[in-house]
Structure formats: C-alpha cells, structure tokens
Amino acid sequence: MNRCVIPQGYRASLNLYDTQVAIAMTKRVFEDTLSGALNLRRVSAPLLLDASTGLNDDLSGVERPVEFDLKATDARAQVVHSLAKWKRQALYRYGFSVDSGIVTDMNAIRRDEDLDNLHSIYVDQWDWEKVIRPEERTVEQLKKTVEKIVEAICATEKTMRALFPTLALLPETDSHVTFVTTQELEDLYPNLMGKERENAFVKEHPTTFLMQIGAPLRSGKPHDHRAPDYDDWSLNGDLLFWNHTLECAYEVSSMGIRVDAETLDCQLNAANCNDRRALPFHKALLAGELPQTMGGGIGQSRLCMLLMGSAHIGEVQSSIWDEETQRICAECGVTLL
C-alpha cells in the first residue's frame, strides 16, 4: 500500500540546485556544531560487517540485513543497519577517555523499510558515541545530552536561514525540549496507538524527547520495539519534532545510554535472545571489558527535511521509489533526487 501524501499547495522552499547546496551546508555545519557540543572526533566507519561478529544492529529485531557471501573469504558480509555496537567497540579499540567520543557518517540499506514521505530504503545518519562514567548512567545525563543536540540543531537552523533567506519563512524549530516517558504517553492517550500518541503529544509540544522505549508498558505491549543489546530500555529515547509541512510527529534521532553487563543480561532474557551471549561483542560486554557509553543516530536526510520544510525525504536524498510514489510526486511538482 502506497503511503506517499503531498500536502495540497506544497512548493519546495529552494530550487533544485540550491537544495543540493543547502544539503551539503547543513551536513557540514551541523556535524561541526555537534562535535563541539559533545566533544566528538570524526572517524571512518564500515559499510559492511562480518555477520559472525554480532556487531550489526537488528533495530527492532525483525529487519533482515542485506547479506551475501564473499569470494575472497569464508565470511558472510552484512550491509550495516546502524553502528551502535560497532561504535562502542571502536571506542575501546581507539582508547578514548571519559567524556570524549566519535562521530561518523553511517550509510545503510534497510530492505524491509515501508516507503512513505519519511522512510526510505537508503538511510544516512550521523552515528555518534562517547565514553561516560558508570555513575553517569542516569536520566539527568541523558536529558542534558538531548538538550545539547537540540541546541546544535537550532544553531544550524539559524545559520541556514541566514544563508538561504527563503527558509526564514518556515516555522522556527522550538528550542525547548519536553521530556515524557512512553508510560506517561500511554496514560495520557490510552485509546490511541503508539504513533497516534506521538502525534497528539508532539502537536502540543513541538520538540519532544520520548523516553524509555523497548520494555512492555502496563498495557502489556511496548510503545515500540528496540533490540536488547545496545540501548538500556530505561535510559533511551527518540527525539521528535512537529513537522509543520506534513503535520505529524517526526523522529530525527534515536539515542540512549547503552547497556551495561547487568542490563544486557536482563534484556537478553526479556527478549528471548540468549543465543547472542556466544557472540564476541556480547561476551566482551558481559565480561565488563567494554567502556560505559552513550550514543545515537541523527538522521541526515531527516534533519535536512526539517530545516528545509521538505514534504518528502526523496527531495533531500537519492534512493529507489515505487512507481506510485514517483507518479504522485511528479503530479505535485515534487522533484525526487
């Protein structure tokens, strides 16, 4: 079922060439601002991972990676879904100290993604990770970091509006962050489904960090699914903005404080994923060999959409779209890159 909807009367704020320039500028400005705010250093990242290492992320636990055998070795390679586990191992290998970390471009293929205005088979994001002290595994540390990321987004928006005056006609991003848990959201809207709850809340609180995603709520169901082996389900969340163009809640980042050995043990049991204990990454973490970290992914195309008021993610990235999406966009004057 096609879920592409272009709002009536929508027109892009920038022409095609200026859009390309603005994409490059947004990525450059935001990465520099984020790196300064969180004390991050840029590193190179893999496109492929050895399937046997357990380093690839399976997101909500059901997505199939793009996987193939390698002629030169006996290994099976997987195109990354994200780099949450790889980054933590990299911090250990590179010897990063407390309160410092890494940022990298992550390019992924998510073959099972449902296509709509916000979702693409191709995913590009800044993956970042930093070392924290064990005593910093707190909600307060999580909130403080979220606020720094929002400050970086608003600073980037200010720069882009100065460079491209037509962007100043768009609604401004709210710099005030409202924090709410998934259980609080369920209590507020018990008769709505997960995404419907997000839409109802974020419409009234246009910059929201939705916390504690993964564990079952009092209703018996989780708000959304999360893999058990990177985020601590009690110390994670999604950064949501109100998308004025599409009139919906809009996730720009998923992030969290990562599991320690105790939390990993509990979450592997809860998710019935105990077979992962034999994988190298999980062995090292359960043995206490890896540093305590926090991190996340920030969508590059999602951020460009937000700052440019785009109606479709295909306006700010090049991917593959079904014929119906191409037809709808063409009829509405929307150019897919």
Image (cartoon, rainbow, N blue to C red):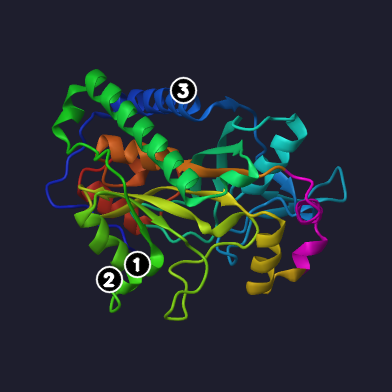
Residue 50 in sight here:
yes
Q: Position of residue 81 (x, y in %)?
A: 59, 51
- Determine the main secondary structure of the stretch shown in magenta: helix
Determine the residue positioned at 55% across, 37% down. 128
Determine the residue positioned at 29% across, 35% down. 307
Mark 1 Cα within 10 Å, few/some/many (few <14, many 20+)? few
The residue where tag 2 is placed is: 188
- Image quadrant in which you'd find residue 64: bottom right
Dot 3 falls on a residue whose secondary structure is: helix
What amino acid is found at the position of numbered circle 3 in the picture?
Answer: Asp
The reply to whether dot 1 and dot 2 touch (C-beta < 8 Å) is yes
Q: Earlier in the sequence, mark 3 or mark 2?
A: 3
Quadrant including the N terminus: bottom left
Left or right, 221 with respect to 164, comes to right
What amino acid is found at the position of numbered circle 2 in the picture?
Answer: Leu
Left or right, 75 with respect to 144, comes to right
The residue where tag 1 is placed is: 184
Residue 83 in sight here:
no
Q: Find the magenta span and give its range.
A: 275-290
- Image quadrant in which you'd find residue 19: top left
Quadrant including the C terminus: top left
Determine the residue positioned at 20% across, 36% down. 172
Mark 3 Cα within 10 Å, few/some/many (few <14, many 20+)? some
The CA span between labels 1 and 2 is 6 Å
The disc label shown at residue 32, or none: 3
Task: Work out whether 121 lies above or below 33.
Answer: below
Residue 118, magenta (yes or no): no
Determine the residue positioned at 45% across, 39% down. 145
